[in-house]
Image (cartoon, rainbow, N blue to C red):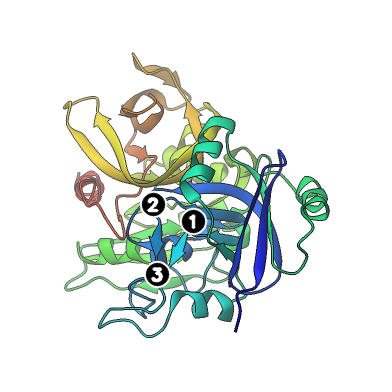
Amino acid sequence: MSPQPAVLVLEDGRTFRGEAYGARGETVGEAVFATGMTGYQETLTDPSYHRQVVVMTAPHIGNTGVNDEDGESDRIWVAGYVVRDPARRPSSWRSRGGLGDELAGQGVVGISGVDTRALTRHLRERGAMRVGISSADPDPERLLAKVLDSPSMRGADLAREVSTAAAYTVPAIGDRRFRIAAVDLGIKTMTPRRLAERRIETLVLPATTTAAELLAVHADGVFFSNGPGDPATADYAVDLMRAAIEVRTPTFGICFGHQILGRALGLGTYKLGYGHRGVNQPVQDRRTGRVAITAHNHGFAVDAPIDEPFRTPYGAAEVSHVGLNDGVVEGLRCLDRPAFSVQYHPEAAAGPHDADPLFDSFVELMSR
């Protein structure tokens, strides 16, 4: 059976041709690139990638197939997938099938045979932009018109689209030490697991939970997860964050949750040129000087003064972590309330695990 031609068109008109990979058809979304050489299954199933077309910079993808253990949710969330050289067959004792078949089974349109490094360089120079992939219609002009008609990520309220519809509990491993509420803005499976390892029971709540419902839980701590979309649209999450801070409940936010803490403190957010995505981002703790290599997936950032503490409605706060590649704010710490956040992913499936001790910091905050 001969390969089916496919075309990829960016909103600035640049076009790449390749072969259909995964489902046949057509898709549009925001083109972003991920630099990890491993962990593609975790990337695909991360709800933070909702409505994004992911370009894998590493050339060879799919060699370990897919399994039942590594998914970060119960489905693939990416809007499309771009690879250069897909594995012809999986090679892993844990594999239960090939990546291409999994993409096709879940209706994810992809393209292979693309120079993904050239595409990555283009996105680095021009910024993340809308994109379309089609194996149904080879005409790039018609596809470009559909791309230009698609919505932008700026102003997109997506956290509610990926959040759980009903609350559920992840039990602690061993004797329960604490019980927390986790606001699901796009939470990954590994996060409650990391907490369970620390004897924490996690009640995962929908993003649409009200402040009164959150406070009625009487949790020992509140966690705000990662998630997709523009944080400027998520007033409902900001209201929950403020409710937790006002009653001095120990609070920890990551990724989207970090941006929500920034907004709750009165700070603004902005869209990055091409975002941070991958498993090799160096971040410095400004208090200790220590550098951690961290996993990221975000296209927005918090605008905060880096060099000195600043005033908020809840007392003083400071920037606790900074990205060494571009100086982006990567962490916030309240000095007068028990609340902190980081822009990256300390659960770090599939790695690295330099930031895992942040969960211990959350435990310490609750222990006080």
Numbered circles on residues, count: 3
**SS assignment at label 2:** strand
Q: Tell me where residue 179 sits by quadrant.
A: bottom left
Q: Earlier in the sequence, mark 3 or mark 1?
A: 3
- x and y, in percent, of residue 160 in the image: 61, 58
Foreground residue among 58 and 318: 58
**Label 3 residue SS:** loop
The answer to whether residue 367 shows anywhere in this view is yes
What residue type is disc 1 on?
Leu
Which image quadrant: the N terminus? bottom right
Report the disc number at residue 222: 2
Q: Is residue 308 above or below residue 206?
A: above
Dot in front, 2 or 3: 3
Q: Is residue 9 left or right of residue 84?
A: right
Q: Which mark is residue 62?
A: 3
Q: Is residue 23 left or right of residue 64?
A: right
Q: Can I make out residue 243 in this image? A: no
The residue labelled by disc 1 is: 214
Q: Secondary structure at mark 1?
A: helix
Q: CA distance from mark 2 to mark 3?
A: 37 Å
Image quarter where the C terminus lies is: top left
User: What's the residue at 37%, 33% (across, down)?
Assistant: 330
Task: Choose between 355 and 178: the one closer to the eye.
Answer: 355
- Tell me which label, 2 or 3, sits earlier in the chain: 3
Identify the amino acid type marked 3.
Gly
Is 312 in front, or is 54? 54
| Label pair 2/1, CB-CB below 8 angstroms | yes
Residue 240: % across, % down:
52, 47
Q: Where on the picture, by quarter, is residue 90?
A: bottom left
Instruction: Give the mark, 2 or 1, whose residue is nearer the N terminus.
Output: 1
In this rendering, which labeled residue sits more in front, label 2 or label 1? 2
